[in-house]
Amino acid sequence: MKAYRLFEWKQPARLVDIPVPEPEAGQVRLKVAGNGICASDLHLMHEWDKSPSHIKVELPMTIGHEVGGWVDKLGQGVSGFETGQPVIVTIAGCGHCRYCAMGMNQYCLNKGKQVGMGLDGGIAEYVNAPVGAVVPVSDIHPADAAPFTDAGLSSYHAVKRVAPLLTGGTTVAVIGVGGLGHLAVQELKAITPAKVIAYDLNDASLELAKESGADVCLKSADENIEKMSVEAVLDFVGAGATIAQAAKMIRPLGHIVAVGRGPGIFEFKHNAMPYGAMISTTFGGTKAELMELIGLAEAGYIKPHITKFGIDEVDKAYQLLAQGKIQGRGVIIP
Ligand SMILES: [Zn+2]
Ligand SMILES: [Zn+2]
């Protein structure tokens, strides 16, 4: 089968032919329908010269952590899924630490290897996933549902964190309307009554923000940032400028979620933000939130903007992603 594999750190990944993998005990083999491409794949392929301690990647490894497909074969001890069933893959936790017990599987203290981050990923014709990470979908094609597992879920987890602040008459800012940001706009409109202001530098992204339901779309520029004007900010960029803009916009008791992993630095001190305002980091989302999100999508509230590429176009797709030229999410179809 075809698979897009990384053989050496800081060397380009290559599309190669490898045997179809057998599912191990506790795993489900999927026939891949589609795999979304993510900026964190670019970090993995181009920036790191060894695996960071938190994810334990050994090479060679197939790239791709945003997978949708059909159940193809069950490993030993796995039940509850049927061959041909459409599913997507999320982050598996150990199931027994305090975070897993709270349902916060993505913050698991014993988080082992994940699909596309330690285990072979989904830019391939088949992929094995731990059964605890497999989530059924019904009314959405699994290639179209793939972006929900990361772009959708990471944004939804941030939206849910600030949603209690976003009652009637409030305002929320979304900075950066890419793969995650355009879904955040839709998620905010689906579950809160807040006015949504979207910021981006790029006209096409602001157009996507408008299509996604943003009430106001503005260029990210200091003159468009009103002091103490919003109850929450979701920053999908994480640059120095965007964090400074977020800190300027936030109201007392407001909440900034720094989702994007840009290199920006925030100097935390008294008077850096109004009283009671807070800023937090975030990672992924819970399995229950992914199920909620799929429910919202199946009810028609959320529709990812997807650009599809064949697996033979995978190098080109990552180049376009690196250049910021993919609107919404790119998905590789094997
Ligand atoms: Zn990702
Ligand atoms: Zn755990």
Image (spheres, rainbow, N blue to C red):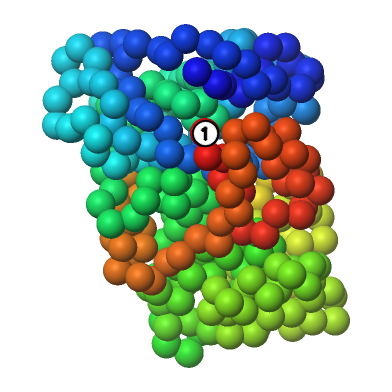
Circle count: 1
Q: Is residue 294 above or below residue 220?
A: above
Side of 166 where 60 appears, left or right: right
Name the spot of residue 116 as percent of width and height, x first. Answer: 52, 26
The answer to whether residue 297 is seen in the rendering is yes
Side of 83 where 313 appears, left or right: right
Q: Is residue 147 above or below residue 195?
A: above
Task: Residue lying at the far bottom in this picture: please name it.
Answer: 169
Q: Residue at x 35, y 70 (%)?
A: 300
The answer to whether residue 97 is seen in the rendering is no
Name the spot of residue 10 as percent of width and height, x first. Answer: 79, 20
Task: Using the image as rendered, state which of residue 34 and residue 237 is in the foreground.
Answer: 34
Side of 91 where 331 appears, left or right: right
Instruction: Count neighbours of disc 1 (C-alpha within 10 A) and say few if under 14, some if 14 to 19, many if 20 or more.
Output: many
Secondary structure of the residue carrying numbered label 1: loop
Picture quadrant of residue 319: top right
Q: Residue at x 76, y 62 (%)?
A: 242
Q: Residue at x 77, y 27 (%)?
A: 46
Task: Using the image as rendered, state which of residue 121 and residue 152 is in the foreground.
Answer: 121
Q: Residue at x 56, y 21 (%)?
A: 3
Q: Residue beneath label 1, please? A: 334
Q: Mark 1 is on which residue type?
A: Pro
Q: Is mark 1 within 8 Å of ligand 1?
A: no
Name the spot of residue 124 as percent of width and height, x first. Answer: 51, 26
Q: Is residue 27 above or below residue 196?
A: above
Task: Using the image as rendered, state which of residue 216 and residue 68 is in the foreground.
Answer: 68
Name the spot of residue 44 as percent of width and height, x first. Answer: 68, 27
